[in-house]
Structure formats: structure tokens, C-alpha cells
Image (cartoon, helix red, strand yellow):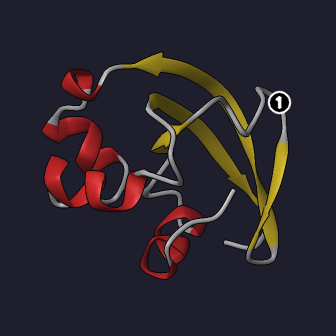
Amino acid sequence: MEFTKRLRPLIVRGEVKCTVRIWRGPHVKVGGHYKLADGFIKVKSIRQITIGDITPVIAKRSGFSGVVELLKVAKHGPGENVYLIDFEYYGEK
């Protein structure tokens, strides 16, 4: 799972612990480990939501100033399914 450069230090410091992705289907699984910096993130949960479920609180928890900014980054390819993914970073802090 890839993250925009500006989010990576926030994730490593533990300030961002969730992400919203718009995919055709889930690209990660609960318990999966995904390389990031000198460590990895471990997916704690993934659930399908709607675009309408994305609140300013979720946007801020994901490292964005608001829903519009989040949506500009969340879509990866032609997918239409929205996923809220909670994770934990393990590694250098």
C-alpha cells in the first residue's frame, strides 16, 4: 500500500493511523504487513463505506485538511468501492 510522501512521516510518528481508498476491491487484508520507511504498517481493520460516510473527522485522522483534499488522493484507478482502513506502524519512530 502506497502513501503520498507528505503522509509518510506522520504515519511513522503515529499521527496518522487510517486511510481511505477507492478501489475495485480490497487490495489489503486484515493482519497484512506492508512496507513503509524502515518498518511496516499492519492492517487492523478494513471496512467498506460510502463517500457520504467520509467526514471531516475521518479526513483529519487520515492526515488531510478536509474531505475534498482526501478524495483527490483516495481514488486509485477505476474503482468505485470506498474502504476505510485502520492500521498501526511498526518500526523506527
- The relative height of residue 27 versus residue 5 in the rendered view (above or below) is above
- Residue 90 coordinates in the image, percent (x, y): 76, 56
Classify residue 8 by image quadrant: bottom right
Residue furthest to the front in view is: 78
Give the residue at x 68% y 29%: 44
- Residue 27 coordinates in the image, percent (x, y): 72, 39
Residue furthest to the bottom in view is: 5
Classify residue 64 by image quadrant: bottom left
Name the amino acid type tagged 1: Gly
Give the residue at x 49% y 18%: 48
Residue 35 appears left or right of 74: right
- Residue 21 coordinates in the image, percent (x, y): 48, 43
Q: Which quadrant is home to the C terminus? A: bottom right
Residue 92 appears left or right of 87: right
**Circle 1 — which element?**
loop
| Structural crowding at the residue carrying mark 1, measured as other residues with C-alpha within 10 Å and reported as few (<14), some (14–19) or many (≥20) | few
Give the residue at x 74% y 37%: 28
For mark 1, what is the residue? 31
- The relative height of residue 41 versus residue 92 in the rendered view (above or below) is above
Give the residue at x 52% y 76%: 9
- The relative height of residue 50 versus residue 42 in the rendered view (above or below) is above
Residue 11 appears left or right of 62: right
